[in-house]
Amino acid sequence: MTIPTPNVAFDELITFLASSPSTREIVTYHPSEKLQARMSDLLEKNRQGRLSIDEQSELDEFLRMNRFMSHLQAKAKQNLSAS
């Protein structure tokens, strides 16, 4: 499996946002299966205490992007409810 770097994950998110997604597309957005699998791997290694420094940085970046999208999706849901 090719291991995505934080830049690949960031690029995926930027590409999605640059495509001018609709509010509904934002609400239903999910990272690619490859990124989800990588995040699962990193979370498991973290639980086991086996993350390298680079992997910790990668996990931190994934978590920041996840929080950002969670906030964006919450706002998008509010906008859908208000319409």
Image (cartoon, helix red, strand yellow):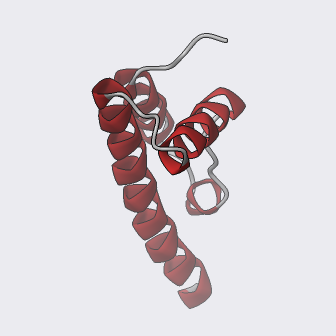
Horizontal arrangement in the rendering, residue 66 relative to residue 53 (left or right): right
Q: The N terminus lies in which quarter of the figure?
A: top right
Relative to 80, residue 25 above or below: above
Q: The C terminus lies in which quarter of the figure?
A: bottom right
Q: Which residue is painted at 71% across and 33% down in the image?
A: 33
Relative to 77, residue 42 above or below: above
Residue 18: image location, x then y, percent: 41, 35
Who is closer to the viewer here, 72 or 4?
Answer: 4
Residue 82: image location, x then y, percent: 54, 89
Q: Which residue is painted at 51% across and 83% down in the image?
A: 78
- Residue lying furthest right: 33
- The quadrant holding residue 32 is top right
- Residue lying furthest front: 49
Who is closer to the viewer here, 41 or 76?
Answer: 41
- Residue lying furthest top: 2
Relative to 70, residue 30 above or below: above
Relative to 14, residue 48 above or below: below
Residue 76: image location, x then y, percent: 50, 70
- Residue lying furthest bottom: 82
Number of residue marks: 0
Who is closer to the viewer here, 50 or 34?
Answer: 50
Q: Which residue is painted at 34% across and 41% down in the image?
A: 61
Q: Which residue is painted at 67% across and 58% down in the image?
A: 28
